[in-house]
Image: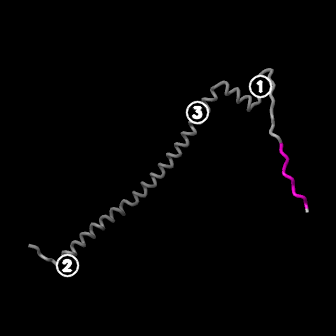
Amino acid sequence: MKVDLGIWDRLTKLILCLIVLAGLVGVVVWYLPLIHHNQRMRKEVLELDGVIEREQQTARQLKADIDAHRDPRTIERLARERLNFARTNETVFRFQAPVTNPPPRPAPK
């Protein structure tokens, strides 16, 4: 047998829906700062991963430079280029870049 309670049945369902909705809003409001904090942390992690990758690339380049400087031929080449060293009885020729003429100045009026 079905009893018609009229408006009270509808109000009860409406109140229950509003309570559930308020609970969901409460959960969202409760966790919203945590969600924003997690997003900031993820962004910071991505930035730091980029920094780590750049530093690892720099470390690889420096290690390659160190390994290259262990070769005696490289040391000799650097000494010749940067310090102007030469072997005994060796003549070194240095060429300078040609000096170009500066652009002409406009005639005074």
Three-letter residue code for mark 1: Ala
Three-letter residue code for mark 2: Ile
Quadrant in the picture for the C terminus: bottom right
Three-letter residue code for mark 3: Lys
Q: Residue at x 75, y 31 (%)?
A: 83
Q: Which residues are magenta?
A: 99-108
Going from N to C along the chain, the mark reached first, 3 or 1, is: 3
Query: Which residue lies under the disc numbered 3?
Result: 63
> Is 101 drawn above or below residue 71 in the view shown?
below
Residue placed most toward the observer, 45 or 104 = 104
Q: Is residue 107 magenta?
A: yes
Q: How busy is the neighbourhood of tag 2: few (under 14 within 10 Å), some, or many (20 plus)?
A: few
* Cα gap from disc 3 to disc 2, whole angstroms: 81 Å
Question: What's the mark number on residue 7?
Answer: 2
Q: Residue at x 50, y 47 (%)?
A: 48
Query: Which residue lies under the disc numbered 1?
Result: 86
